[in-house]
Image: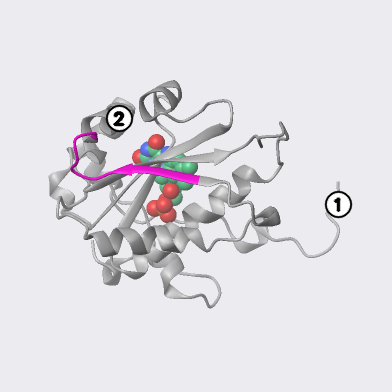
Amino acid sequence: MTASANPRVPSAEVNPLFVDRWSPRSFSDQPLTDNEIASIFEGARWSPSSFNRQPWLFVYETDGPDREVFDSILMPGNQVWATQAPLIGFIFANTKTPEGRRPRTSQFDTGAAWMALALQARSMGIYTHGMAGIDNDAAYEKLGVSSEYYTVMCGFVAGRIGPREALPSDLQERESPNDRKSLSEIAHKGVMSS
Ligand SMILES: Cc1cc2nc3c(=O)[nH]c(=O)nc-3n(C[C@H](O)[C@H](O)[C@H](O)COP(=O)(O)O)c2cc1C
């Protein structure tokens, strides 16, 4: 699937990056360069956050010695396809401060950083796919992240897109950009009537 085969039709003018970003399951095993990896995290680094707390934490691996540990944290349904991708990571939100406060926007801010990462990647021809289907307890234990101070949000992979035919047949059928709710369902002008 290339961007030109993207069936999505925006309902208002929008930067094509937003509709061209989608989450494939077929990834090429072509490695990402160190510069590419730095750039996608750089996109996340400049995300906005409440009080500029920058509560996001990305823990990732490529083909290094810890790769199997990272892959093992995924649920089997995600392992089927995601272990092929050249980069895997897990996203944590710092949800408790050293003083014991629990800032209300930590997860919101971390979501913004994830989207920035995804769009920066897509602007470079690199696709991403987020995964909530992970073993949450294993994410803290195996990656050495404090479950007292952090909340695991999801796993993700990044890489160049691979051929649809490389997927099991049930996943091949779903390997296409999906649609969205209408604008009127998600944006309301004025007071909502109850
Ligand atoms: C937080 C989060 C968790 C997700 N979890 C999974 C998952 O476990 N497995 C999967 O195949 N896709 C997962 N997805 C991908 C979504 O299904 C996908 O983003 C959604 O259908 C919209 O499609 P698009 O990203 O191609 O635009 C997840 C996406 C996000 C943002």
Q: Is residue 55 above or below residue 11?
A: above
Mark 2 or mark 1: name the one nearer the start of the chain.
Answer: 2
Residue at the spot 61% in from the left edge and 60% down from the top edge? 48
Q: Position of residue 151 (x, y in %)?
A: 55, 33
Direction from residue 14 to residue 186 in the image, left or right: right
Residue at the spot 42% in from the left edge and 74% down from the top edge? 16
Which residue is disc 2 drawn over?
A: 77
Q: Amino acid at mark 2?
A: Gly
Q: Which residues are magenta?
A: 57-66
What separation in Å lies between label 2 and label 1 (alpha carbons)? Answer: 41 Å
In reply to whether residue 64 is colored magenta, the answer given is yes
Which residue is disc 1 drawn over?
A: 193
Crowding near the residue tagged with mark 2, few <14, some 14–19, many ≥20 C-alpha atoms within 10 Å = few
Nearer to the camera, 178 or 111:
111
Nearer to the camera, 101 or 117:
101
Q: Position of residue 63 (x, y in %)?
A: 18, 43
Residue at the spot 36% in from the left edge and 70% down from the top edge? 123
- Where is residue 9, by image quadrant? bottom left
Residue 7 visible, this angle: no
Residue at the spot 83% in from the left edge and 54% down from the top edge? 192
Q: Position of residue 33 (x, y in %)?
A: 21, 60
Q: Which disc, if any, is residue 163?
A: none
Q: Amino acid at mark 1?
A: Ser
Of all residues, the one furthest to the front in this rendering is 98
| Front position among marks 2 and 1 | 2
Direction from residue 177 to residue 83 in the image, left or right: left
Mark 2, ligand 1, within 8 Å: the answer is: yes
Nearer to the camera, 42 or 123:
42
Q: Position of residue 53 (x, y in %)?
A: 63, 51
Crowding near the residue tagged with mark 1, few <14, some 14–19, many ≥20 C-alpha atoms within 10 Å = few
